[in-house]
Amino acid sequence: MFGFEKLEIWQRAIVFADDVYSVTRHFPADERFGLTNQMRRAAVSVSSNLAEGSGRISKKDFARFVEIAAGSLYEVISQSHIGKNQGFLPSDDFERLYAAAEEQSRMLSGLRRSLLEGV
């Protein structure tokens, strides 16, 4: 098992990406290379950056990848608003993604803070 796989935030990011894939599966076909693709790529980026960052030698480098992961998480939420406004994303799916993102955001912030303590 790789070290990042033990991180609860990484595990939740994987579930979040699965949720994003699930809800975007119902988006219109003409959005496959637009909003669907953007949301999926950003969601996958959260766990990917956590995995990549965990392999960095310094805690400061890892913290930078945590920042990037947070940015990707925020992208998904911004894109979710658009999906909801366009009628692609039902309100209950939006609320579920939003709540998961809020929790992950807090966890990412805590991880970043802990990595930078004493640096």
Image (cartoon, rainbow, N blue to C red):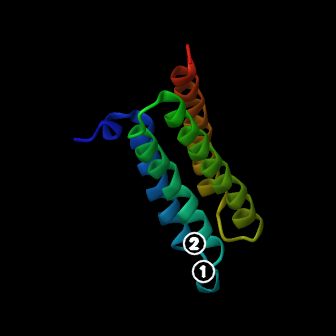
| Residue 33 % position (x, y) | 60, 80
Mark 1–mark 2 contact, CB under 8 Å?
yes
**Residue 85 vs residue 67: left or right?**
right
Q: Disc 1 marks which amino acid?
A: Phe
Whole-Å distance between the Cαs marked 1 and 2? 5 Å
Residue density around tag 2, few if under 14, some if 14–19, many if 20 or more, within 10 Å: some
Figure check: 13 above or below 42: above
Q: In terms of secondary structure, where does tag 1 sit?
A: loop
| Residue 65 % position (x, y) | 54, 42
| Residue 99 % position (x, y) | 60, 41
**Residue 59 vs residue 93: left or right?**
left
Q: Disc 2 marks which amino acid?
A: Asn
Q: In terms of secondary structure, where does tag 2 sit?
A: helix
Q: Quadrant of residue 38?
A: bottom right
Q: Nearer the viewer, residue 104 or 84?
A: 104
Figure check: 23 above or below 10: below
| Residue 23 % position (x, y) | 54, 64
Residue at image x 56%, y 29%?
112
Residue at the spot of label 2: 37
